[in-house]
Structure formats: C-alpha cells, structure tokens
Image (cartoon, rainbow, N blue to C red):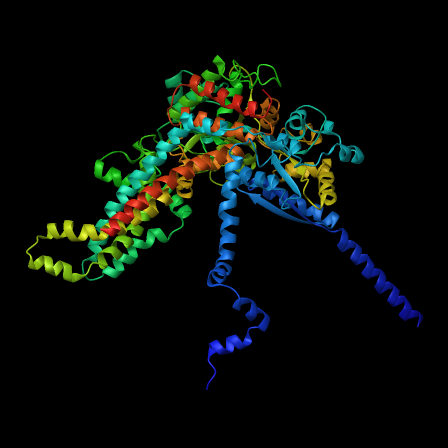
Amino acid sequence: MKFSKLTTVSALSMAVASLGATAQADDLTLCWAAWDPANALVELSKEFEAQSGHNMSFEFIPWPNFADRMLNELNSGGKLCDLLIGDSQWIGGGAENGHYVKLNDFFDAEGISMGDFADATVYAYSTWPKGTPNYYALPAMGDANGWFYRKDWFARDDIRDAFKAETGRELGEPKTQKEMLEIAQFFQGREIDGQTVYGAAIFTERGSEGITMGVTSALYPWGFKYENTPGAYDMEGAVNSAEAVEALEFYKEFYKTATPPGYTNSYMGESLDAFKSGQVAMAMNWFAFFPGLYADPNTGGDKIDFFVNPPQNQAGSTLGGQGISVVAYSDKQDAALEYIKWFANPEVQQKWWDLGGYSAHKAVLESPDFVDSAPFAGDFLEAMGAVQDFWQEPAYAELLLAMQKRIHDYVVADQGTAQEALDKLIEDWTETFEDEGKL
Amino acid sequence: MSETPVSRAARATPPTVARKIKGLSDRAIAWIFVAPTIFLLLAINIFPLIWTIRLSFTNFRANRLNREVEWVGLRNYERILTDTDIWLNMQATAHFLFWTIFFQVLIGFTLAWLINKKFKGNDLWTTIIVLPMMLSPAVVGNFWKFLYQPQIGLFNYIIAFFTGKDPSSFEMLGSVDLAPWSIVIVDTWMWTPFVMLICLAGLRSIPDYIYEAAEIDRASKLRQFFTITIPMVLPFLMLAVLFRGIENFKMFDLVVQLTGGGPGSTTELTSINLKREAFEKWRTGYASAYAIILFVTVFGLASIYVKALNKVKER
C-alpha cells in the first residue's frame, strides 16, 4: 500500500513537472535574410534550445524580398516573427511605429550593457532617435561593404609586369578609390589563362537597395554627407556637394569601364557569382560573405584576399549589418527576451564569430587573437571604424527608392548629369521630409 | 400517378417557407437570388473603389495607422499629373502596350491562318505553339533573363550569328534603347499563342460555303481574304486586342523579373511604379489617386473600344 502510494505520488509529480516544462517551452520564430550567416545562427541557436527548452524556428527571406516581406509583416501587425534581425535602416520605423519592443528596462534588469558592444554598431543598430540611449535592438551582426580580389592573379609576374608597364606602379591592394579603378580598368577585357576577365563586380541593382549601397561606397570616401547640420534636414550643398558629384561620376566611370558586360542589375548574388566563376579580378560585397568566400574550394584559400573599402578624401565604408529586436506583436515576448539575454553573453558571441557570424561584442573584437582569427578580421575592424549608414528615418523606404531611381537613371541609364541626379534627389527627399512634417 | 421530383421537392419544403414564397412576386424572388452576388460585388469591388476614391484626397499611409490623416484635396492628383517621371512611366507603358498588341495580332493571326490550313501534324504544331502561354510569367521572366545574358545568352548568340556582331557587344536588358524592346519580345513570345487561338476560333467559324460561293464568283484568293476572312475574323481579333490590352496595361510580374523596371526607369511601367508607391513607399493616399487615374484611363479607353467592337459585330 505504502509502495503504491509512493508510486502514485511520484507519477503525479513527474506529470506535473512535465506539464510545467511544456507550459514554459515556447516555439520561437526568428526572422532574418537568407544568407550565409543565417545558417551559422541556426547552428548557434541549437545551444539555446538545449539550455532553455524552447524550440527555435527560422524564417529566412532572400535579400531582394527581405525588406518588402518583413516590413509588410510589421506594418500589418503580423505574428510570424517573435524575433527579427532587421536592417539597420528600419530602426526608426520600428521604434516610431511601435513594431519593436523598447529594451532599456530589460537591459537594465538583466545587466546587459550597451557599452560592451562596439560604439558604431550600438549607434547604428540599436538607438532611436539616433545616438540617444533608447534601445530597440541588440547589435547582432556587424557588417560593412568591403572588397576581395584574386590574390593569385595579383601575384603573377606576367600580370605584375604588364601592370607596371601600363601604370608605372606595383600591382597591389589599392590605397585609394582611384587606384582601385585603375586596377579594375587594367584587368578589364584581359586574357588570363585563355579566358577573358573583367575588372570588378560592383552593385548596380535597381529594385531594392543595391545601387545605393554600391554608390555610397564611393560617396562616403569622397566626404558625402546627408545634411549640413545633423538633424536639420538641410541637404542643399551636402547631398549635391562638389565632392558628391565627383564621387558619383567616379562610380559611373567604374561601371562603364571596369565591370563585366550585362552587369546592369546586380547585387550580392551576382557579385559572388562573378567572382567564383573567375570572371572578375575584384568584387565588392558585404563582409558577411567573406568566410564563405575564403572557404570556397575554387577561388578561396590562397587565391583570395580582402581589403577594406579604400579611402579617397577620407576613410568611409557603407554600413551593413543588423540588430536583433523583439517584435511588439509577438505573444512570446518573454521567451524572445530570453533569447536576447542568451545571445548577449560574451561566450555565445565568441561562438557566433567562430561559426561565421560577425559579433559586435567588444569582448570578441578587442580580444588579442581577433585580428589573426581570419584573413578578413583586421579589415572588418578597420571598416567598422569608419562606417556610415543611409537615412534611418521612419520614411527610409521612400528615401531609399528615390535614391535607387536617381542613381540608376544616371549611372546605368545614362540620363542627365551627376549634378542633376543629386539635385533631383534633394527634391525627392525634401518632398518626403515635408510630408513627414520635418521640413 | 407516380411522384415527380418537383412534387417531391414541393412536399419537402416546409409549409411556412412555402407560404412565404408563395406570397412573393417573381421580381422579389429574383432579387433574393441575385442579392448574394450583389452583396459580394458591393463588398469586394464597389466599396473598395469608393474607399480608394476617398483615400486619394488624403495623405493616409497604411503603415502609419496612428498618424493623423489630413484632407489634402486635389494635391495628390496635381502631383501625379504634373510629375514628368510619371509621364515617362506612362510613355513606357504606351510603348509596351502598342507594340506587344501590334506584334501579337500580326504574328498570332498569321499563325492561326497557317494552322487553319489542313496539313499533317497541325494538332501537334498547335500544341507546341501554345506551350509558352502555359508557363508562369515569373518562370518566363527568369529564363529569358538568361537568354538575354550578353556573355552566355542564346539570344545574343543567335543575333550575333546573323549579324556578325560580338555577342557581348550589346545588352538587351541593360541598354536604354534595347530594354523596352526586350520586354516586348518576351511578352509577344508568351502571349501570341493566345491571340492565335482566338483567331483560329474565328477562322474555323467561317462556313465553307461562303468561300465556295466566292470561288463560283471567281473571286481571287486575295479578294476572298480581304472581303471574307478579315471581316469575319475581325470581331474575334478585336476581342483578343481588348483582352491583351487590359492584361498588358497591368503588366507587372514578367517585367519585374526581367528588368526590375530598369535600366534606370526605362521599363518602369505604371503598374510597377504604382506598386512601389503603394507597398514600398507606403504613400497610400497618393497611390490611391494614382490608381484612380489609371482606372479612369483604362475604363474610358475600354468603353470606347467595346462600343467600336459592338458596331463591328452588328455589321
């Protein structure tokens, strides 16, 4: 009798315990873009599942549709995503439209300090209004637009001799934007091992954000600014400055004289394809792809090397990367916050970097081993020290589409001059800010 | 006397309902039957239309529901109609519309006329010809993108074979001059079979005795073609033009896949621009005004066209 009572009590306790566990375990969905780092995050998150008992599902959207799909989801108050690794430019809209949960109280309660993360990433990925201590995301994935090149071609004597004969200088990683163009023009149409190769793959995509991300990689080093006075929206003389016009003309010259034929609507995928197929000597792309490129059996390893976007009048790289936010419409915000707490842990951040993600945690970035941990790690640090981002206003999509149109019209479709393109861009942006009540 | 299905149904009808229906006029019963359809029509078509008209006079944004909506009067309409970029989109749409219909009618009718000749294997040829229109526009857009690729694309190699030019010396999708034609070519390739099928139906509806009578009157083949074939196929042809015109006015998927509206804005048709305004920029009020302008344009043109079509039918 005693034994049977004990058995009954034990069975009941186990049942209650298992019920408790079931009630606490949530199915969390994390939304992000479909690209290499997303696979690393799936791997990393297995540890969170084991620790917390929550199940992680992932919704990865291809980049060209990512903004469209996710912003529609947020605008419609959808519950698809509990966690969202959204683009840096969405932070303004995410905060002002109430899509993201404000994380200040949570950070304070859990002892998560934004001072532990790289300043540039906190500013770009987490804060709204910009630079204020109002946090809507935890820096999740540091990124910038960088360059990679065929190290094996650059090392060949015949090519080096030909380059020196043509330009009077040694072939090597470019130190300025203009040197980079010169190298690209040197390779354009050249025969290497019986194959015609081209200078460089740059971003020219029209539909989403491609050409803007590409052209800003030239604009920032020339000293481009969005406003004369930050926060004043006074764009005349900044957006269409003489330096900006020169940079835009430079990008057009780059496109016209140093890219493969048919490269009129190309972004990340096309850049990777052009490089991996041995078509180009250099290519621009996000650092996020560099681990995969280095591991590529055909064009990776000894055949590839990386460099930061070269300066011209100043250092400047286009910011990529994202912060991770809790979606305000999620019913599982507690579990989602648990994930953020786990993700902010320095040990998890180190594993994140080891798996191919770009941690923004200072414990990782400032570690003495970091620079030598990958052939592109030093370049990444350098790039993150001089990054600039596009407008992060709630109306960012409208501002971005206007820039896509004006730049593509000028660079690819040969319409008007650089000065006219930038003047028109100011008109478009002024109209947007007037509609927003900011002008 | 055996029981009929009608008497069985009458017996099964509850007396109260039967009594109620009995007291209704034919007109009332007709209204009962059409009411669900009218309700759906009002809910799905008319109400959104009226709502869109209302929104077109405001600065409403569907992604900012907590923002105060202002009445802006005709400002959205004024902005659209005075925007040179939108007129360029309209021009691109008109170019696409005119040339796709022109080529589809020309080639579609020619193919129908040839297929209508009795020859061995004509059913097989019909099947082969209609294959493109069975494909998804997204798939067609994607594979034509490869065909147009300057370095490896088959299209460029075929043109190079006939002209002696270097295949990578021209870019169908990247050139401002060629891109508008590249989308015309693909749409023509895909939808000519549709026009062909309609024309074929028209050709097969012409009774043989009319041609026999013409033969007896010693009318030449050319005369028969212009006085019998063309007039009798014309209503079918005009119907095909109406269908293709309406479809191509709202063309979106194929062109987005092929060019994304580029280079620049060369192939940015009004539907692509409207989608960007409405669902990427989220200028809902502005996009509503844009949609109303397009609706009035299509509705007006289609009404005039349908009147012309009816006149041709009456002849």
* Residue B33: % across, % down: 49, 61
Q: Is residue A36 left or right of residue A340?
A: left
Q: What residue lies at 49% left-to-right and 55% top-to-bottom?
A: B37
Residue B90 or B44: which is nearer the viewer?
B44
* Residue B250: % across, % down: 40, 42
Q: Quadrant of residue A66?
A: top right
Q: What residue lies at 20% left-to-right and 54% top-to-bottom?
A: B114
Residue B115 in sight from this viewpoint: yes
Residue A204 or B67: which is nearer the viewer?
B67
Residue A425 or A183: which is nearer the viewer?
A425
**Rendered position, A378 above or below A232:** below
Residue B280 or B23: which is nearer the viewer?
B23
* Number of numbered labels in the structure image: 0
Q: Quadrant of residue A354?
A: top right
* Residue A324: % across, % down: 66, 37
* Residue A198: % across, % down: 39, 30
Residue A208 in sight from this viewpoint: no
Residue furthest to the bottom:
B1
Q: Is residue A57 left or right of residue A347?
A: left
